[in-house]
Image: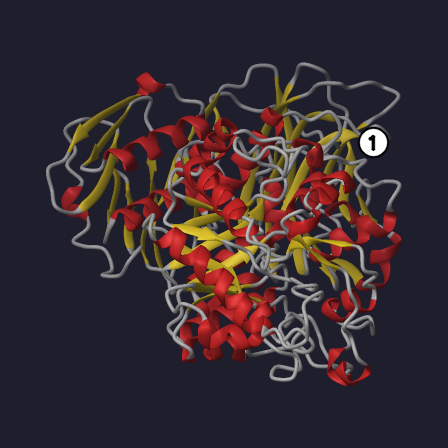
């Protein structure tokens, strides 16, 4: 709890114990919540039962208060929840518009047992015409939320100190020990084993780091500075001689923490974390494991701003070894008008920090028309990012332990978004939009959720003979151009271990060729040439799998583009087996069926390929895909975030898409802001991922860490 060295005088709340019912209180219910929300008072406890989740402000508990500018106050109450964990906003704000904060604007996670909460703030912006209101917003909860023992006291001279206290919960239950913050600590992804013990470790002014891994020590120091505001000279680092991957943190130099943990789980990425009153000890099975332990510790620190870390022991390891996120490196204007490269860097800095916290291993950045090629500047004339810019993005990701590799659309969509003049200048290199669709290709299984034909079929129907945005690989100039572009990108990304060559959705591949040309053979020859070029560099090729799958073989899946009339699925047995297939499926309903299994994973495995499963925002799809990846001993999971920039804008700019309500509804409906956390849960603990995801709102969790907060 946050306590004070002085006594708080006076009670500013009327009817704080609900002895007079709701007199002086107001439980605000938005019209959309009235039919599904109930409230009642018994024995001094207000209980609110919420049947469906909404925006947090749609259910509020409020009372007007007579506070004064410059005075300090302490708000306190007990609370508990029944239902999934979710963030609750605690505010003191103006009663009416513009609802400015009066000095208190924070969030907590209520526990599933009675816990005590205290908040100290100094009043500001108080004006008589717009009365200050204590406001608790919890409309995003589902289940019941109960409150008791409210109090608002004040003093002109408050000096907070840390105090550990134990408060009895309900009768016949275990007391709850809290330190300063009463937030229920959540580590994402949920560790497999957590043992909590009474007591805390209080971060001192100077922290003494013991480690035998300089990268781990630097990561810990850099992120603690970011979270707490400490300075470089607040740390002392000593090298620990050991074969183990170890990091210890204490408040004095004479505390030896190495023996506090015997060993980490023997598995790639496994770690053990121990927070004790005398210090913190972390051991990893390998360097990745040590980094994972540090990231779990940093998540605890993020939620306990006082630095009073609750005592616990965590032993954990991931189910899948390759855990990646695929996203596009968007140009600055995708984040708002007049944004600069520096603004874009800040957005990706936020993203990379969260990916690091959630223990991802890799990031794939798709470069789609936005990289300034030195040898061929004419192919993407409006490109934004130089080699030096890309290196800065890669360095940001590397700071958080993430390996970065690029994707370039080397086949069907290389010229995506390029001006007509650019297409015309490369006319001889491009396929034509020629309709090859026949009536026999239609199939009842091809209907998607809205009853339209699949995208491949739509593209074929819309063919008009004009220039497509994909290469005609029969032109001998194509392969040298693409190799040059790959070479530049490979160097700018620091010679990565992987290179994604795209090759998806090539809807007009070879449409202008004679019928007797085997398009499967041509497709395989082209991809194999790129693979062997990369192999000479010691780099492994990754490609999308949709052009290798036919609707006739997998009729209940939306993302299969290799069937008739192009028949590029015939390339499968001809491709080099050291290529990694990125098998993407978004969980769309097809023919009235929602996929629960992904047989294409085992199909690729049977043909000798390593496979990475790629879901999008659909949480059941993430979980089911991860299960099938693990069951076939495939390489791992790579989440995708195709519209994360839109979700980011929606949550950081209250006016985003205000003139496009359909777009706003579509973005909000996807809950794409939560993709980073939910994909992490799916790949870390496959058997419990559904249960873990149900415990919190991953979108609200992400919004909590955005660098730009919503206006009140």
Front residue of 215 and 25: 215
Q: Residue at x 69, y 76 (%)?
A: 565
**Height in image: 235 above or below 90?**
above
Q: Position of residue 653 (x, y in %)?
A: 74, 35
Front residue of 154 and 371: 371
Left or right of 439, for residue 375: left
Left or right of 227, for residue 341: right
**Height in image: 528 above or below 424?**
below
Q: Residue at x 65, y 64 (%)?
A: 509
Left or right of 558, for residue 158: left
Secondary structure, mark 1, is loop
Is residue 687 visible in this depiction of the protein? no
Is residue 327 visible in this depiction of the protein? yes
Q: Position of residue 178 (x, y in %)?
A: 44, 43
Colour setting: secondary structure
Q: Residues within 10 Å of mark 1 (few under 14, many from 20)?
A: some
Q: Residue at x 31, y 17 (%)?
A: 233
Q: Position of residue 536 (x, y in %)?
A: 33, 51
| Count of marks, rendered view | 1
Specify the quadrant that holds the C terminus: top right
Residue wearing tag 1: 95
Front residue of 168 and 160: 160
Front residue of 368 and 140: 368
Q: Position of residue 306 (x, y in %)?
A: 44, 31
């Amino acid at each position: 709890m946050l306590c004070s060295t002085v006594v708080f005088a006076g009670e500013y709340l009327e009817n704080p114990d609900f002895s007079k019912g709701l007199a002086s209180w107001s439980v605000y219910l938005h019209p959309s919540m009235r039919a599904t929300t109930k409230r009642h008072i018994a024995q001094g406890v207000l209980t609110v039962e919420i049947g469906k989740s909404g925006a947090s402000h749609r259910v509020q508990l409020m009372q007007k208060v007579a506070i004064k500018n410059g005075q300090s106050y302490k708000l306190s109450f007990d609370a508990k929840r029944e239902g999934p964990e979710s963030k609750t906003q605690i505010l003191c704000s103006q009663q009416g518009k513009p609802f400015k904060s009066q000095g208190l604007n924070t969030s907590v996670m209520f526990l599933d047992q009675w816990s005590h909460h205290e908040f100290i703030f100094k009043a500001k912006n108080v004006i008589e015409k717009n009365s200050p209101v204590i406001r608790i917003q919890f409309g995003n909860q589902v289940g019941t939320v109960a409150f008791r023992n409210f109090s608002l006291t004040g003093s002109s001279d408050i000096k907070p100190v840390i105090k550990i206290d134990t408060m009895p919960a309900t009768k016949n239950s275990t007391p709850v020990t809290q330190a300063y913050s009463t937030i229920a600590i959540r580590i994402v992804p949920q560790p497999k084993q957590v043992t909590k013990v009474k007591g805390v470790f209080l971060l001192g002014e100077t922290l003494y780091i013991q480690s035998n891994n300089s990268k781990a020590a630097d990561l810990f120091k850099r992120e603690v500075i970011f979270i707490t505001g400490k300075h470089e000279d607040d740390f002392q680092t000593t090298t620990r001689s050991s074969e183990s991957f170890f990091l210890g943190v204490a408040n004095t130099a004479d505390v030896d923490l190495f023996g506090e943990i015997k060993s980490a789980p023997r598995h790639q990425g496994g770690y053990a974390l121990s927070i004790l009153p005398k210090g913190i000890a972390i051991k990893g099975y390998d360097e990745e494991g040590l980094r994972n332990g540090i990231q779990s510790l940093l998540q605890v620190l993020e939620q306990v701003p006082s630095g009073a870390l609750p005592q616990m022991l965590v032993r954990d390891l991931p189910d899948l070894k390759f855990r990646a996120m695929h996203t596009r490196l968007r140009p600055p204007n995708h984040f708002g008008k007049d944004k600069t490269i520096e603004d874009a860097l800040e957005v990706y800095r936020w993203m990379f920090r969260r990916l690091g916290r959630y223990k991802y291993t890799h990031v794939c950045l798709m470069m789609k028309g936005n990289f300034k090629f030195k040898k061929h500047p004419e192919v993407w004339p409006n490109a934004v990012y130089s080699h030096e810019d890309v290196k800065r993005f890669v360095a940001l990701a590397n700071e958080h332990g993430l390996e970065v590799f690029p994707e370039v659309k080397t086949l069907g969509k290389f010229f995506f978004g390029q001006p007509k003049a650019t297409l015309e200048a490369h006319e001889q290199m491009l396929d034509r939009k020629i309709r090859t669709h026949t009536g026999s290709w239609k199939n009842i299984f091809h209907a998607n959720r809205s009853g339209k034909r699949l995208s491949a079929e739509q593209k074929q129907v819309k063919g008009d003979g004009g220039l497509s945005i994909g290469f005609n690989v029969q032109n001998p100039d194509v392969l040298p151009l693409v190799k040059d572009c790959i070479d530049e990108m490979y160097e700018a990304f620091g010679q990565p271990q992987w290179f994604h060559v795209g090759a998806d959705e090539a809807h007009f591949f070879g449409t202008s060729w004679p019928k007797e040309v085997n398009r499967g053979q041509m497709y395989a020859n082209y991809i194999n040439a790129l693979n062997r070029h990369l192999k000479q560099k010691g780099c492994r090729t990754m490609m999308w799998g949709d052009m290798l799958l036919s609707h006739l073989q997998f009729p209940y899946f939306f993302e299969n583009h290799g069937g008739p009339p192009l028949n590029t699925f015939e390339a499968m047995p001809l491709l080099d087996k050291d290529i990694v297939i990125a098998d993407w499926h978004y969980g769309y309903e097809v023919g009235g069926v929602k996929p629960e299994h992904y047989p294409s994973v085992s199909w690729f495995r049977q043909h000798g390929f390593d496979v990475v499963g790629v879901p999008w925002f659909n949480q059941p799809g993430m979980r089911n895909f991860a299960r099938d990846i693990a069951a076939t001993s495939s390489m791992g999971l790579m989440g995708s975030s195709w519209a994360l920039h839109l979700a980011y804008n929606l949550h950081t700019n209250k006016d985003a898409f205000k003139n496009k309500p359909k777009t706003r509804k579509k973005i909000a409906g996807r809950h794409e802001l939560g993709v980073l956390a939910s994909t992490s849960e799916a790949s870390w603990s496959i058997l419990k991922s559904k249960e873990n995801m149900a415990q919190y709102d991953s979108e609200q969790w992400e919004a909590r860490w955005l660098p730009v907060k919503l206006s009140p």
